[in-house]
Image (spheres, helix red, strand yellow):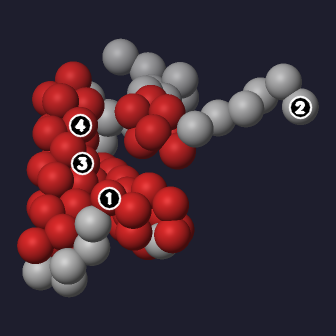
């Protein structure tokens, strides 16, 4: 199994240049909002996030990744080049 792929790479391969930039900015923004809401709204502290309940942090980052990827694929997906078209 030499073909190990990350989820980010899957989205990046299918996006235009503007889509790649938007993907990272949206993902970063969603991650920041998620982590700040865990800390300030739900009262988590660093022990909760990094030791006891790290699965909440991982799941939130993965959900942010899917949301960011879905938004960017909807707006900035690369045009598929088909070899069948003759000019």
Label 2 CA crowd tier, 10 Å (few <14, some 14–19, many 20+)? few
Residue 63 in picture, x, y percent from top left: 38, 66
Other-residue count near label 1 (Cα within 10 Å), few / some / many at <14 / 14–19 / ≥20 = few
**Residue at 18% in and 30% down:** 21
- Residue 26 in the image: state x and y as whole percent: 16, 48
- Callout 4 touching callout 3 (CB < 8 Å): yes
Q: Secondary structure at mark 4?
A: helix
Residue linked to disc 2: 1
State the separation of the CA atoms marked 4 and 3: 5 Å
Q: CA distance from mark 1 to mark 3?
A: 21 Å
Classify residue 2 by image quadrant. Answer: top right
Q: Earlier in the sequence, mark 3 or mark 2?
A: 2
Precedes in sequence: disc 4 or disc 1: 4
Position above or below: 26 against 16:
below
Q: Is residue 14 left or right of residue 40?
A: right
Q: Secondary structure at mark 2?
A: loop
Residue 70 position, x and y percent, is 32, 59
Quarter containing the N terminus: top right
Which callout, 2 or 4, points at the residue further toward the start of the chain? 2
Tell me if mark 3 has few (under 14), some (14-19) or many (20+) residues whose alpha carbon lies within 10 angstroms of its own: many
Q: Which mark is residue 24?
A: 4
Residue annotated with mark 1: 46
Instruction: Give the distance between the C-alpha atoms of the residues marked 2 and 1, in whole angstroms.
Output: 36 Å
Task: Give the camera-side residue of 33 and 4.
Answer: 33
Cα distance in 3D space between marks 3 and 2: 28 Å
Judged from the image, the secondary structure of the residue bearing numbered disc 1 is helix
Q: Which residue is the site of mark 3? A: 27
The residue drawn where x is 58% and y is 38% is 6
The CA distance from mark 4 to mark 1 is 25 Å
């Amino acid at each position: 199994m030499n073909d190990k792929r990350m989820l980010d790479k899957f989205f990046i391969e299918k996006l235009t240049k503007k889509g790649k930039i938007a993907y990272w900015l949206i993902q970063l923004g969603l991650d920041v909002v998620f982590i700040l809401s865990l800390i300030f709204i739900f009262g988590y502290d660093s022990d909760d996030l990094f030791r006891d309940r790290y699965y909440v942090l991982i799941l939130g980052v993965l959900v942010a990744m899917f949301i960011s990827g879905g938004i960017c694929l909807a707006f900035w997906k690369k045009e598929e080049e088909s070899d069948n078209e003759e000019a």
